[in-house]
Image (cartoon, helix red, strand yellow):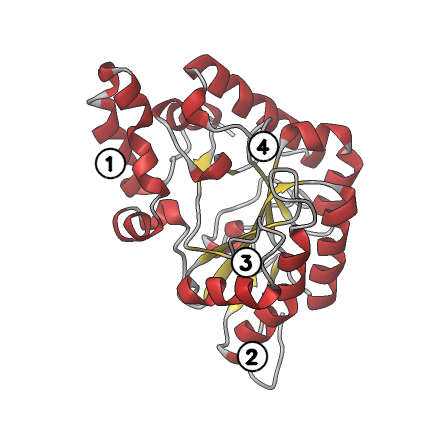
Amino acid sequence: MAGGVRVGGPDLRRLLAGTAAVAAGGAVGHALPVVTASGVLRRRCWPRLAGVGAANRIALTFDDGPRRASTARFLRALERADVRATFFLLGRLLDRDPGLGREMAAAGHELAVHGWEHRNLLCRSPAATYADIARARDAVAAVTGAAPLWYRPPYGVLTISALLACRRLGLTPRLWTAWGRDWDATRSPAAIWETIVKDLDGGGTLLLHDSDHASSPGAWRGALAVLPRLVRWARERELTIGTLGAHEERGCREPGAGVCRSGSDRGMATYRVGNRSR
């Protein structure tokens, strides 16, 4: 995808413009976009960056995979529910099992970039940040046959360097409006669900984790357990669960690339009370 692709729309362009003015200040300029890590502030000031979309839809996203021991279980659960999701992948893990990435794309899921390594960008130089994102983007493109659309930084921490890298690489940063705080294996599925529904509503983007690569061992089991409840919750509210691409009606470059076509509901599962349709 060409470097001229919009990075996050007007709200993120305003963020870039504002932070560029202080970039010469060194560390302060480098770290200033970290303010977007605040969920409340992000939803209020940068709704597109937060992943706010159509009010009748929810984007389901997963971070930190792929790992066959856990990710494959999510794929089976999503297939049973007829739901497609966006997976923000770590290039290092994808490089170990590209076959799993191909399986995910073939199942209609959208593959996106989480970086090559799971490291806080505040501790990385501009050159290292660019190299990390570019290497992961290339790994995803090699698996799907098309350049990915989305980028989400580890820990949700953006920097000037990451924003500029995304602009050069044709990636659009997307964070989330709701999460499950599911990286702690001691949290029960009930506690994870309570955290989710506190902020999730139509038009939102939900973050969960399909791997414990950067979490406590086995933490992914809590996220897996809440998926059926999420589907029931969406059905009761006549909400559509699916990928970020469909949530924002962004087009895919070619069929089978794991990215939804513009104006379509490919990769979405629409629930109607008493009548499920696709």
Say what secondary structure mark 2 lies in.
loop
Judging from the image, what secondary structure is the residue with disc 1 in? helix
User: How far across and down, in percent of the image, does residue 111 sit?
Assistant: 62, 42
Residue kind at label 3, given as amino acid type: Ser
Gap between marks 3 and 1 measured at Cα = 29 Å
Residue 156: quadrant of the picture = top left
Mark 3 packing: few (<14 Cα in 10 Å), some, or many (20+)?
Answer: some
Q: Nearer the viewer, mark 4 or mark 1?
A: 1
Mark 3 or mark 1: which comes first in sequence? 1
The disc label shown at residue 272, or none: 2
Between 210 and 94, the one nearer to me in the picture: 210
Tell me the amino acid under the disc marked 1.
Answer: Arg
Reply above or below: 52 against 217.
Answer: below
The residue tagged 1 is 14
- Circle 4 residue: 147
Q: Is residue 181 left or right of residue 42?
A: right
Residue 169 visible within the image: yes
Q: Which mark is residue 264?
A: 3
Q: Along the polypeptide, which appears first: circle 2 or circle 3? A: 3
> Is the residue marked by circle 2 packed among few (<14), some (14-19), or many (20+) residues within 10 Å?
some
Answer few, some or many: residues within 10 Å of disc 4's Cα (few below 14, many 20 plus, some between 14 and 19): many
Mark closer to the observer (3, 4): 4
At label 2, which amino acid type do we have? Arg
